[in-house]
Amino acid sequence: MSPSNLASVAVGRPVRGEFTYVVPDGLSGRLSPGQRILVPFGRSMSLGFFLGPATPPPESESVKLKPIMKVLEDSPSLPPDLIALLRFAAEHYRYPLGEVIKSALPPGLTKAEEEKQAKPDVQEFAVALVPEAPAVLRRAPAQSAALAYLLAVGGRAPIEEVAHAIPGARETLRKLVDRGFVRIEEEVIAPGVKEGLAQGRPDQLTPEQAAAVTELHTAVDLGGFQPFLLHGVTGSGKTEVYLRAVERALEHGKGSLVLVPEIALTPQLVGRFRSRFGADVAVLHSALKDRERLFHWQALRKGSVRIAVGVRSAVFAPVENLGLVVVDEEHDPSFKQEDKLRYQARDLAVVRAKQAGAVVVLGSATPSLETLENTRRGRYRKLELKNRVDDRPMPTIQLVDLRQERPREPLAQEEAPILSPPLLDAMAETIGRGQQVILFLNRRGHSTFLICEVCGTSVKCSECDVCLTYHRSQNRLVCHYCGVAHPVPEHCRECTGPLLKMGIGTERVEAEVAERIPQARVARLDRDSATSAERLTELLASFARREIDVLVGTQMVAKGHDFPGVTLVCVVMADTSLAIPDFRASERTFHLLTQVAGRAGRGKDPGRVLVQTYNPDAEPVKRMLAHDFDGFAEGELGRRKVLAWPPYTRMAAVRLEGESAEQTASVARLLGDFIGRNMPPASWGVRLLGPAIAPISRIRGRTRWQLLLKAPTHAALAPLLARLEAKLVDIPSAVRVTIDVDPAAML
Ligand code: ADP
Ligand code: ZN
């Protein structure tokens, strides 16, 4: 058997490794890597992916190899650089290759069926004919929301996309057409067509932008893998730098991939790409329909669309001739997928750029310590934007020490207030000037726990090991882990004592603002209020139209919004995220505080930030007050080094979950023993922490255990993880075990 007769194949089943098949004579010459094929597997047929020629198996394993049955497509769905990335992901994250490939492909290509073309290549676009939502739409919230979305993304978007952002928008857009506010255009997406839009392209870059752009242009011109960190303060114009780099790649006929944390929260960014590059942009968000996913996949694969802008999963988009990869807000936790293939899209973006020989830019005002450490070691080049666009000043940040600045006595409400006099004064003054306020607190609900005044017992979820949050709007106690809502008990279950509502959530802050500053128009932005994409878009648009004076919200208000009317940002309690038992708590707190502060003073009026806290001496609070990212990073990296946490250590978490507490504990011990027996030599520096019960010991009635592995490098961990993955086959299925490589959350 000649080696060219053998094919290495990934089978679309949850099985490890690659498989060797025989290429029958009829198919030789018709195979190219990345093609979907049909192969016999076990007793049935399965979808497979041809990866390339295979080397013959050793004589000893003289199994009879089976033939490939059929080639399902002429041109391969997977380009070569993507095959390399998917192979890397399967290996690194210990996940079956066939499943990795299936999770990357659009659903239309994951069945064992012949190729279908996404038809037609005609897309319908909605075009806004008015610059803002007219007053007559005030009573038509659905139409107003659809129009607001359209305007926010640059005035023109595929109907499909609007309909996904806002369910039912197809109908709504038709009504808007009847009223003359919107026009529908059909567009045939043809290769190489690019509209000469270039709306809102500033003539002049700031000197810092210009310097960064020059470096990136040089790198793009040169070609080849080059990683950069773009560290630019909030409002320094990072997006414009990305846009210029994408332009340059296009001039070389190269494609770009742009990853962003959440599209629904920052439609402006999509708008800027679309208004610059028109139909050359595919927007890949999480709510696309199957048909649409297939359409985008094939358009990118053919090279008829050359730029992909999308969330986490877009790291797998088949951009042709990839020249540039951008990861905006690279520190954002949403780049980590927390189920199935538990990948970190920012990390894969760098790997992808390396395999494709592309330039990669990781941008942030608050880079992750991992990325920063790569810069310090000289692996990434650092580009800095230290000033805001137009010499706008950074906001002034002021501390309010809650131990001294006691909030005024309660008025009508029963609970102790949380807004201190300096905060209330600043808010009233800002609103009086016709400007807007953002109030940030990273906890939703009204009170975050109920506690018995007599015996001190707090009310917990019966299925999860967490306190229940009181939601006044529903008059229910809600578990934020399993989502179950319970009626509010009258008395303590243990001793019948009265229950006190403790801990502050956004609902309560909203109520307090309404009570203290009655003239203010207040709204709340969190997962409870933004129940649908429609509500979310409408809320953001309404705030942008300045129909809301005060926006109270969770981390959703801290994202990359650009609201020029906001001159005051208040952090209601800087300490909330510090007490979490996670080595990243301090970093996360610093990121959130800096990001939310960055929403202030982005327009012509200067911004101001007030930070309430009980912990004015906490590192992230102190450093954020001084705009001192470098100082914070320096100190935090020092601590991480001493305690051997990332980025000085690579980690893997082995998580267990089971109905039976005893069985879960015993499997955890069994895996602990297994790891102990399979430990590499001590010189490799691998350490096992645990098995231990997880910090949140129960969710949805299932007991949780975890084991943590630490090592100086990933290479030191890899053989052990491979053995562990193979061992999982023997674990009783009642206990679910997952391997989480480079874990983000420690809970
Ligand atoms: P960042 O992402 O760094 O927070 P943005 O990219 O959102 O900042 O830019 C902030 C604002 O400045 C945006 O409204 C953008 O349109 C504007 N802007 C960016 N670059 C320039 C420039 N060179 N000249 C004028 N305005 C600019
Ligand atoms: Zn629960």
Image: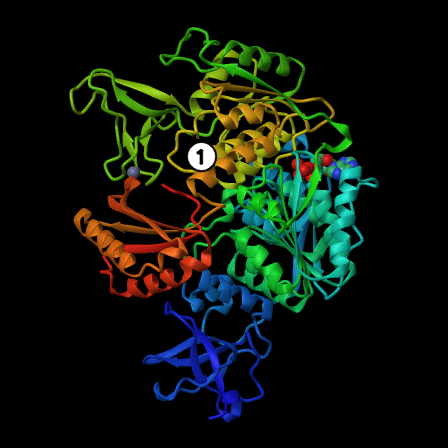
Q: Position of residue 659 (x, y in %)?
A: 21, 49
- The residue positioned farthest toward the front in the image shown: 683
Report helix, strand or loop for mark 1: helix
| Residue 261 placement, left or right of 739 | right
At 61% across and 46% down in the image, what residue appears? 375
Q: Determine whether 286 is above or below 291 in the image.
A: above
| Front-lying residue, 101 or 479 | 101
Q: Residue pushed farthest right? A: 203
Q: Is there any visible trace of residue 558 in the rendered image? A: no
Residue nearest the observer in this picture, 381 or 235: 381
Whether 272 is drawn above or below 550: the answer is below
Q: What residue do we see at 62% from left, 29% from top? A: 599
Q: Nearer the viewer, residue 246 or 293?
A: 246
Q: Is residue 703 above or below residue 88?
A: above
Q: Amino acid at mark 1?
A: Ala
Q: Mark 1 Cα within 10 Å, few/some/many (few <14, many 20+)?
A: some
The residue tagged 1 is 585
Along the horizontal axis of the image, is 192 left or right of 708?
Answer: right
314 relative to 678 in the view: left or right: right
Q: Is residue 358 visible?
A: yes
Q: Look at the picture and state if 40 lies above or below 135.
A: below
Question: Residue at coordinates 63% horizontally, 62% vertically from top-left?
Answer: 319
Q: Which residue is painted at 34% across and 64% down in the image?
A: 723
Q: Quadrant of ligand 2?
A: top left
Residue 127: percent from left, percent from top: 70, 47
Dividing the picture into quadrants, the one containing residue 18 is bottom left
Place of residue 735 in the rendered image (x, y in percent of width and height, measured from the top left):
25, 55
